[in-house]
Amino acid sequence: MFGKLDWSAIPFDQPIPLIAAAAIGVILAAVLGWITVKGHWPYLWNEWITSVDHKRIGVMYVMLGVVMLLRGFSDVILMRTHQAAAIGASQGYLPPEHYNQIFSAHGTIMIFFGSMPFIIGLMNFVVPLQLGVRDVAFPTLNSVSFWLTASGALLTNVSLVIGEFARTGWLPYAPLSETNYSPGVGVDYYLWALQIAGVGTLMSGVNLVTTILKMRAPGMGYLRMPMFCWTALGSNMLIVAAFPILTATLAMLTLDRYLGFHFFTNEAGGNPMMFMNLIWAWGHPEVYILVLPAFGIFSEVFSTFSSKPLFGYRSMVLATLFIVVVSFTVWLHHFFTMGAGGDVNAFFGISTSVIAVGTGVKVFNWLFTMYGGRVRFDTPMLWALAFVLYFVVGGMTGVLLAVPPADFLLHNSMFLVAHFHNVIVGGVVFGAMAGYEYWFPKAFGFRLDEWWGKLAFWLTVVGTVVVFGAFYIVGLEGMTRRLQHIDNIAWYDWIMVALAGTLLIAGGVVAQVMQLVMSIRHRDRLRDETGDPWDGRSLEWITPSPPPVFNFPVLPDVHGEEAYWEIKRRAIEQQQLSEVPDYQPIEMPRNSPTGVITAFFCTSVGFALIWHIWWLAALGLVGAYVTFVVFAWRDEVEFEIPAEEVERVDRARRESRQVILERGAPA
Amino acid sequence: MHVAMRSRFSRSGMRVCLAAGMVLVLSACSRSIMDPAGPVAAGERTILLDALAIMLAIVLPTMAATVAFAWWFRAGNTRATYRPDFVHSGRIELIVWSIPLLTIMFLGGVIWVGSHRLDPGRPLESRVRPLEVQVVSLDWKWLFIYPQQGVASVNRLIIPAGVPVHFELTSASVLNTFFVHQLGSQIYTMNGMRSQLNLQADRPGQYYGQSAHFSGDGFSDMNFWTVAVPVGQFNNWAAGARGNGPVLSAANYQQFARQSQGVKPFTFRAVQPGLFDAVVRQQLPPAPGPEEGRGGHTTTSPGDAH
């Protein structure tokens, strides 16, 4: 009836996951109870869960990302405290079978369910606004993408209490991940969670590429798009090109595990190294999928807070596309130590270093954006500055690791761990934080508290320097990653330093949460009346904060590289707003529960396949298919917003815009 | 058994540290990769430092410029000129592309030469005939076979100082990595495949060796000491090893290959000829994984000290 699932799947003998799960359960029950008591369900269902509005979906993506980043960080606390207590004769408090799940889950969650949703959410929210359009190309598909990503996150977290998660690292290298060496359900959780979320990501990529290529405001040619749209285009093209590789690779491992195939097994002609090649053929582009949009965010931030257009715009576009192409030619640097020989290693070493040319160009252009500007040190700008200082170091150690003879000493060491955290935290997380601080007023209509924001910034930045500085050093002392027990007492001091740094970051996380709480409490004081709190330059700042469901009453006409800046400058010079347009009724897509229902069935399918509950899997597949059929045969696709309503919204916006006129010439 | 072994290891580790009287840069008993004990590690350290110096030459000025530009052009600085139209400059673009490009071209040369000169499969230049060692990584212990001496050692690698060592490596089960960081290059061990590695210890001493690729539950303690001794002492050790200990045959290899942890170092007095090749060719089948346990969990085999 329930396949492999029985009571033994629940780790009653392990207090940590049980307590964690109980805490999550209590919090979840409290939240759901509060929603029920307050009668918020209809609002949540109509305005959020079934919403196909790109802004709402973007916000939900970011919220998912934030929650999962917190989950991933709780894994950090476990790992750091455990390692500090497991040196020499001490054994720590986590047995290997548990510790190995934690570092595997940490990597998986941080990449797939923390960073990815955060970045995709920002793209979802911002790209249509910057392009001057009303939604993405396929709004309902967008909702399906989000809910499938949430399904994957849910399955990953279910593994905490029902069964186990993978104990193979965040990339389940064969043959360790094959049934012979990992007979439990951990790898299966990994496979199905990622397959389901991966389909969501792929569809999201298709959606955003189509949106950017096909749906821009009148007059917005490719070379007038804001830099963030360019990097989003690059990132999503990489998603479309790279995620099918991930899907195929995981499918092959699934066939090995479920049907006794031999793609990656030791025996019967399987080739485990093929898994490494394939997973990194996806995995290295994935790095750029994450970091390119972050580069775009920093471009927007540097330009806005320097009160200057981005320096060398065309050069930046070129550098972005250069990175997109070259990112597919470097994957072998993840396993120089395979022993492929001098020619192969040298080729991939050089191609890897070549990517640094593209990023180097970007760094210099950001510097010259500040040159001759008027730099304001608001929180987003602080994150951007810290990013540059951080990222050049991370980039440098990255090129160091791309030198094969150096990699022979540093591969798999804590130095490597320090390097990729240096670039992913310094690039992607700092970028996500800059984007969050920068676009929050647009999404919710009030600014975030600067004091708490700056406190969070300093604690996080100093904490990460301490932690990863210690990792660099201990890596040079020869320490390997993923140690559940540290045999060599020479590394003790640096592990303790890293623990201290973790506490600082924890302080930063608390301050970040406090910032949100305090900002909500003081939202009236922090209210953004104008829709343009930072003296922005691209089209998202022309709409009110938060923007109406249709984004723009009439689609803006674009006449230059900085669409909104030109409109704003003209209005200020003439001391009057543009003429009142002729308002037309606007057709917007209807809300649809398709996404959440599909995801419900897909979660069931995933869970059923993990536990070999075949009837439930069949039922889920039929359910998902029926959902699709019902959606395909729908009668009403859109609803109409009358012209009077559009006019009413725009009148309010125009009134608030007077403030900007009175504010005088652009800062 | 496990704990006892570890304390003995750390005691001997201390002794080596004290005896060698090394410059202790970072902590009480630091033997980092910056402290090479052989030609390969020394060559790799040199390349590492060279590459670092080349890049620091542009990274440090860039960092300084970031801080300087941000500070000088702060909104409150009335002495700075506001130039909102300074958005493009052909000359700066040229420099901006040239600096990283030239650096990477230079570094590319270093990579090309280094990758070939320090390729792990390349024999070391020496007048002495290399010692052959065949390495098998097992779950979770190391087997070192000395075909020329006809003996094998478990979890302790004894090599003569000043003599190049040619390693052939494979894995009994999952992917693993052989790494003695003071001697240099790490290399993967893969079932059904044969890797090549050449190392040399220039001076006698004990060097920390480890499994550098996660391989399952027993991974963390899958470490071994590499002991480099004078040639005469090595020959004595080999002769002594031939005198006692069990024999490594195909049959008891398969027993030995089962998962276990915390195996104390010991030697085999004889090794069935061709055993290593049989592992590589999979005539001896890949070693089994854990026995399946309850629901989601799996148990490891006996010997699990945790």
Image: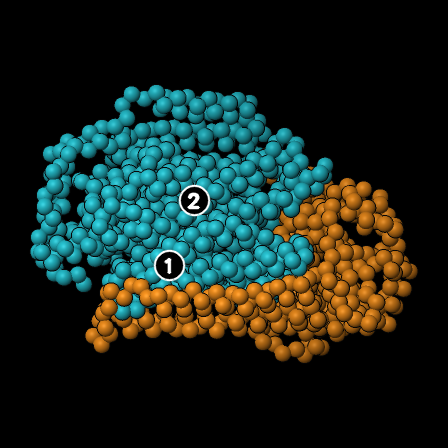
Q: Name the residue: 71% across, 71% down.
A: B38
Q: Is residue A665 above or below residue B305?
A: below
In the rendered image, what is the letter of the chain coloured cyan? A
Q: Please indicate whether residue A249 sits to the left or right of residue B77 in the image.
A: right
Please name the residue that numbered disc 1 is placed on.
A315
Q: Which sits earlier in the primary sequence, circle 2 or circle 1?
A: 2
Residue positioned 14% across, 55% down in the render:
A570
Residue A472 spot, x, y in % from top left: 53, 65
Q: Chain of mark 2?
A: A
Between residues B48 and A318, which one lies in front from this camera angle?
A: A318
Q: Amino acid at mark 2?
A: Met
SS for callout 1: helix
Task: Judge by depth and name the residue closer to the eye, A409 or B109.
Answer: B109
Residue designated by label 2:
A237
**Image coords of residue B102 (percent x, y):** 49, 68
- Chain B tint in image: orange
Up-down relation of residue A667 to residue B69 (above or below): above
